[in-house]
C-alpha cells in the first residue's frame, strides 16, 4: 500500500486494535525485515494461452487446475498423521517493504505453501473509494485506507505468482472495522454477505477500476478460489460463519483454540489460531505477531530498540515450542497468523522466517495452506478424525500410533524376548 495511505489508516485504527484480540494491518513502510532470503527464485511460467479463459472484464481468468497442489490421501490404518503447519498473512498486499515477494521466496526455498488473506480495498484505487459501501458506515470509509495504481499493480503481480506456486488467496474482507460503532462484531449475517460480495467484486474488477486494461489477469476464478478467511481483529465470527456457510466457504480461522485437532462448526472447518507457550511467562500466547507485540511493547509498534531482538526470539521460541509439543505429541496442525509489517524493527518477520526454515524441512512435516489442510481433513475417515480429536494438547497415544489408529494392538518388535507372534491380518 502507498506509505501515505497506510500512515493515515494507522492513526484511525490503532486504538481499536489495542482493545482487540488480534492485529490490524496498520503499519508504515520501513526497511525490509528479516534476512534477504533466496536471491534467484525460478520464474513461474504462465499457463499456455490456449488454457486461459477471461472472466468479466479480464481482471481474473480461468486457467485450469491450480498448479502444485498435492492430492490429499487418506491415512492408512495405523499410519501416524503428518504434522501440518499453516502460515497465513492478514491483509496481504505488496508495498514498499516488499514482504509479500520476500516470503514467497522463503516459502519456495523451504518446500512450503501459505495462505494470503487479501484485503479487497487493496485492489481499489483511492480515487474510486466511494465504490466501497461498508456496512454501517458511509461510502468510501475504510480504516486501512485504499491503494494507488502502483500498489495495485505490485499486489496483482504477487497474487498471480503466489497462486501459480500453489499458495492460497483467501480474504481479510475490506475496511477492517473493529470495536464498537459499526465494527464487524456488530454486523448481521446479511451485512457480512454484502461485505464478502464487495471483497470479491474489487478483485474481479481491478482492471476496470484502475484502467490497466492491458495487464495480465489473475489466473483464477475468485468465486471458486475463495473458500475461507479471517475476520478483522477476530471479531464477528459467529455471524460471519453463518454467512460463509451459505456462500459455500469451507473454513474459518477467526477464533482462538488450543493445540488440538480441528472440528467442524456450522458446516465449516474451524481452523482457528492457537495458544502456544510464551517463553518467560506462565500463560500461553496466541500464534500471531500482533499479539506477541501487544504483550511486549503494548500499542507502540516501535518499542524499545534494545528489546527488539529479545522480543523476536520470544515469538520464535514460543512458536517452536508449540510446534514440538504437537510434533512429538498429538500431531495437531499448528496454525500461525501474521501481518506484512515491520513492527518493532521487523523482529517478528525475522522470527517467522526462522520458524519456516526450522520446521518445514523436517520429516513428516507439511507446511500448507488452509485450503490444502481442509482438503486433507475432508479426505480422512471420520472415525480417524474423531480419535485424533480426543487427544489433548501435546498428548501422544500411550499405546503408540499404530495401535491407536488401527484399532488393534501394535505387534511387538521382532527379537524382543517373550514377545508374542504378530497375528497376520
Image: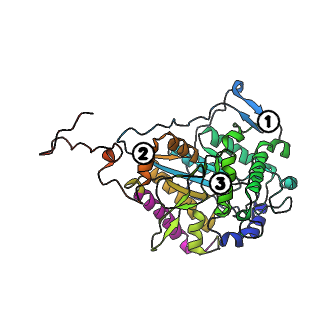
Count the numbered circles shown. 3
The segment highlighted magenta reads 302-325
Q: CA distance from mark 1 to mark 2?
A: 44 Å
Name the quarter where the C terminus is drawn: top left
In magenta segment, residue 318: yes
Q: Residue furthest left?
A: 417
Residue 300 in the image: above or below residue 320 = below
Residue 139 in the image: above or below residue 38 = below
Discs 2, 3 touching: Cβ within 8 Å: no
Would you call the spot at circle 2 few (<14 residues within 10 Å), some (14-19), or many (20 or more)?
A: some
Would you call the spot at circle 3 few (<14 residues within 10 Å), some (14-19), or many (20 or more)?
A: many
Q: Give the numbered dot on residue 70.
A: none
Residue hosting label 1:
58
Secondary structure under the numbered disc 1 in the rendered image: loop
Q: Residue at horizontal 52%, vertical 37%? A: 70
Residue hosting label 2:
384
Q: Image check: 371 left or right of 78? A: right
Secondary structure under the numbered disc 2 in the rendered image: helix
Foreground mark, 1 or 2, reads: 2
Secondary structure under the numbered disc 3 in the rendered image: helix
First in residue order: circle 2 vs circle 3: 3
Q: CA distance from mark 2 to mark 3?
A: 25 Å
Residue 333 in the image: above or below residue 306 = above
Discs 3, 1 touching: Cβ within 8 Å: no
Residue hosting label 3:
241
Task: Give the percent coordinates (x, y) of residue 131.
Answer: 86, 52
Q: Nearer the viewer, residue 100 or 208?
A: 208
First in residue order: circle 1 vs circle 2: 1
Which quadrant of the view contains residue 296?
A: bottom right
Task: Give the percent coordinates (x, y) of residue 20.
Answer: 65, 69
Q: Image check: 149 left or right of 104? A: right
Amino acid at each position: 500500500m502507498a506509505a501515505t495511505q497506510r500512515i493515515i489508516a494507522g492513526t484511525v485504527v490503532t486504538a481499536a486494535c489495542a482493545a482487540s484480540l488480534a492485529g490490524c494491518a496498520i503499519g508504515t513502510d520501513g526497511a525490509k525485515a528479516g534476512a534477504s532470503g533466496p536471491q534467484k527464485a525460478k520464474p513461474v511460467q504462465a499457463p499456455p494461452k490456449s488454457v486461459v479463459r477471461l472472466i468479466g472484464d479480464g481482471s481474473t481468468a480461468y486457467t485450469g487446475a491450480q498448479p502444485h497442489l498435492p492430492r490429499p490421501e487418506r491415512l492408512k490404518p495405523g499410519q501416524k498423521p503428518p504434522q501440518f503447519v499453516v502460515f497465513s498473512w492478514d491483509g496481504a498486499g505488496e508495498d514498499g517493504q516488499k514482504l509479500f515477494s520476500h516470503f514467497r521466496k522463503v516459502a519456495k526455498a523451504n518446500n512450503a505453501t501459505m495462505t494470503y488473506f487479501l484485503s479487497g480495498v487493496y485492489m481499489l484505487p483511492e480515487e474510486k473509494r466511494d465504490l466501497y459501501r461498508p456496512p454501517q458506515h458511509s461510502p468510501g470509509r475504510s480504516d486501512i485506507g485504499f491503494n494507488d495504481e502502483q500498489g495495485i499493480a505490485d499486489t496483482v503481480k504477487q497474487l498471480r505468482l503466489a497462486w501459480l506456486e500453489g499458495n492460497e488467496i483467501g480474504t481479510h474482507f475490506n475496511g477492517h472495522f473493529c470495536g464498537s460503532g459499526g465494527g464487524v462484531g456488530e454486523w448481521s449475517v446479511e451485512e457480512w454477505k454484502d461485505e464478502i460480495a464487495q471483497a470479491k467484486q474489487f478483485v474481479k474488477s481491478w482492471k476496470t477500476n484502475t484502467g490497466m486494461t492491458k495487464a495480465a489477469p489473475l489466473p483464477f476464478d475468485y468465486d471458486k478460489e475463495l473458500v475461507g478467511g479471517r475476520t478483522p481483529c477476530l471479531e464477528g465470527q459467529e455471524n460471519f460463519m453463518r454467512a460463509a456457510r451459505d456462500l459455500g466457504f469451507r473454513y474459518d480461522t477467526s477464533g482462538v483454540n488450543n493445540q488440538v485437532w480441528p472440528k467442524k462448526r456450522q458446516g465449516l472447518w474451524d481452523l482457528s489460531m492457537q495458544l502456544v507457550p510464551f517463553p518467560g511467562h506462565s500463560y500461553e500466547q496466541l500464534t500471531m505477531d500482533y499479539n506477541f507485540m501487544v504483550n511486549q511493547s503494548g500499542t507502540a509498534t516501535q518499542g524499545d530498540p534494545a528489546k527488539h531482538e529479545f522480543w523476536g526470539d520470544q515469538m520464535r521460541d514460543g512458536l517452536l515450542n508449540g510446534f514440538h509439543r504437537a510434533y512429538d505429541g498429538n500431531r495437531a496442525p499448528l496454525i500461525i497468523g501474521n501481518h506484512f509489517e515491520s513492527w518493532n524493527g521487523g523482529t517478528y518477520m525475522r522470527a517467522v522466517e526462522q520458524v519456516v526454515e526450522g520446521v518445514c524441512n523436517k520429516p513428516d512435516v507439511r507446511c500448507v495452506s488452509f485450503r490444502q489442510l481442509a482438503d486433507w481433513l475432508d479426505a480422512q475417515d471420520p472415525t480417524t478424525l474423531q480419535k485424533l480429536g480426543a487427544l489433548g494438547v501435546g498428548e501422544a497415544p500411550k499405546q503408540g500410533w499404530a495401535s491407536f489408529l488401527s484399532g488393534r494392538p501394535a505387534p511387538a518388535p521382532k527379537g524382543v524376548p517373550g514377545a508374542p507372534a504378530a497375528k497376520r491380518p
